[in-house]
Amino acid sequence: MQALRLHSIVIMHLLSEPVGGLGGDFEFTIMSAAPDKVVMSGTKTRNMITLTPMPKERTWTSYLEGVLANQDAIFLGTFKLMVNGKEVGSVVQDYNVFTLTYNGADERDPKVEIPFLYTDEGIKLYEPIIINGVAMSAFKSDVASVSFVCADAGVDAKLEAFYPGGYRFYDQLVGIYKMGTKTVTVTANADRNTYTLTGFYSLSRVQAEYARSIGTLSIKAQSVGMAYGYYAQLCAWNTSSGNLNWMEGFGMMGVNSTDDPLTISFVDNGVWGESDSFIVYAFSGLPPVNGNAVGSIERIIGPVLVKQD
């Protein structure tokens, strides 16, 4: 069998590198090849990937614009799975994976992970799921009802989006918070997708993202300027093991309280799986690597923000 190997560093390596990767591949075995379809298997994960040609009347630009429009139109990350008009489970989205929790699970596993990808019309599951004899594999966006409606013939099913408890809109997160003895100010940025945090780290500002799908703050590893002559890096940190990580995407996601005052605790965002705190670490050079790590500058242990205004 023939193989496809990507030797030059491309975006796929970000998804597949050890530790910091997302369980992907950059080496593939070609299982079959035809003009209308190429099927490959990931060398490391054995995941299957099917490549089909773009229709001649479409351009990559228009297709990707459609994909992005779908993601933007139905942005929430929590859904009810409705089959034949009955709610059979709840779904939480984490990146491109749905976690389905069945209502009143019997002989089935109570939770099932369902990988998917966005298309220009909606979403397509990595493989079909079967519930009560109903097979589902593709869903079309229905912006009016904020739902993904199953597109398989004869199937009455949809993923109906809803706002999770504690959801806050962008402007509702702006304000002054207490974090232990510190005062932290969350300021809106012009892009209205990010915030600037003052006081979270005492020597510099920290950037946070608005996690629109769940309505909370997302803080990731990032450069925070210079300190004491060294390059300072905000790192995801596990206080029990002492392990820290400064790789892109690693960090923590806010969990909002449902009542007032708004209280935001933080949990690992799922990229690393171990973060419970942050640590600002000094490096003698860039990019930050083990060889130029110097030591800790400041520890932000188990951050909890309590809104004051």
Image (cartoon, helix red, strand yellow):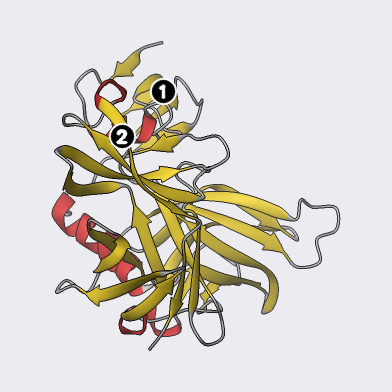
Q: Which mark is residue 32?
A: 1
Instruction: Name the residue at 45% across, 83% down.
Output: 145
Q: Identify the residue position indicated by label 2 in the image.
A: 14
Viewer-proximal residue, 90 or 48? 90
Mark 1 closeness class: few <14, some 14–19, many ≥20 residues within 10 Å: few
Quarter in which the C terminus is drawn: bottom left
Helix, strand or loop for disc 1: strand
Residue 122 image point, x, y percent: 39, 63
Viewer-proximal residue, 130 or 236? 236
Residue 256, above or below 136: below
Q: What residue type is disc 1 on?
A: Ser
Is residue 154 shown to the viewer in this render? yes
Foreground mark, 1 or 2, reads 2
Q: What residue type is disc 2 on?
A: Leu
Residue 76, above or below 283: below
Residue 141 image point, x, y percent: 40, 70
Q: Which mark is residue 95?
A: none
Residue 174 image point, x, y percent: 31, 80
The outermost residue toward the right is: 106
Is residue 55 shown to the viewer in this render? no
Residue 159 image point, x, y percent: 54, 70
Q: Is residue 309 left or right of residue 160?
A: left
Q: Quadrant of residue 178?
A: bottom left
Mark 2 closeness class: few <14, some 14–19, many ≥20 residues within 10 Å: some
